[in-house]
Image: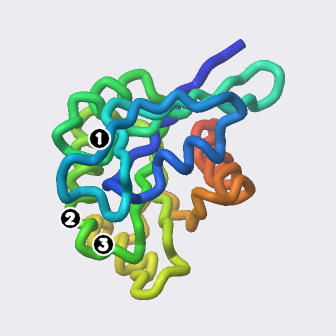
Amino acid sequence: MKNMRLVVTGPVGAGKSTFVQTASEIEVVQIERTVSNDTSIGKQETTVAFDFGKVKFGPDLDLHIYGTPGQSRFDFMWDILIQDAQAYILLVAAHRPDDLPYARSILSFMEQRVEIPMIIGLTHMDCSGALSAEDITLQLGYVTDKNCPPIVTVNPNVRASVLSTLMTSMELLIPGNA
């Protein structure tokens, strides 16, 4: 049996915990606390360590999915979780353009620590005021398609959407697809 690690990261409220819950075939381990500052964005609780779930890909592969906290004060957990990961997903809420500089800083943090495949998952694309994928990738610092990672639209509440995103991530790990 082989275990692989996938990290799901992004700003507060991008859908990380929901993504892990929707994907997981086991009861999700969540380490959350009541929100104590203005980062709530309508949330009562926030992840303070990680979310953990698991998906089985055939008889010989378990994908362990770790959701990071969204707040930078927990960046020490980002550092721990990204180590030994085979890939990661940066979730970005398309309807919150003010979060994009912070999403870019998370991306920079991860790129400084690992060189592994990643994708950008755009959530809330169906909300009023959602930016286009092109606008988001430009604000994340990808000015050409040449260096831009795969971009997917994902609804963290819909299992088929989450599984499709996971498959896109897994395809990057197959030799010849990266």
| Colour mapping | rainbow
Of the image marks 3 and 2, the number of the one nearer the N terminus: 2
Relative depth, front residue between 24 and 149: 24
User: Looking at the picture, does residue 32 appear above or below residue 45?
Assistant: above
Locate the N terminus by quadrant.
Answer: top right
- Residue annotated with mark 3: 143
Give the residue at the far top of this rendering.
1
Relative depth, front residue between 27 and 177: 27
- Residue displayed at 29% across by 50% down: 107
- Residue 170 rendering spot, x and y as whole percentages: 63, 41
Q: Nearer the viewer, mark 1 or mark 3?
A: 1
Relative depth, front residue between 89 and 130: 130
- Residue annotated with mark 2: 101
The three-letter code of the residue at mark 1 reads: Met
Q: Is residue 142 left or right of residue 1?
A: left
Q: Is residue 147 left or right of residue 139?
A: right
- Residue displayed at 47% across by 32% down: 30
Distance between mark 3 and mark 2 Cα atoms: 15 Å
- Residue annotated with mark 1: 110
- Residue 68 rendering spot, x and y as whole percentages: 38, 38
Would you identify the image quadrant in which residue 40 lies? bottom left
Helix, strand or loop status at disc 3 = loop
- Residue displayed at 58% across by 46% down: 169
- Residue 163 rendering spot, x and y as whole percentages: 69, 49
Distance between mark 1 and mark 2 Cα atoms: 14 Å
The three-letter code of the residue at mark 3 reads: Val
- Mark 3–mark 2 CB contact (< 8 Å): no
Would you identify the image quadrant in which residue 42 lies? bottom left
Helix, strand or loop status at disc 1 = helix
- Residue 124 rendering spot, x and y as whole percentages: 49, 71
Q: Nearer the viewer, mark 1 or mark 2?
A: 2
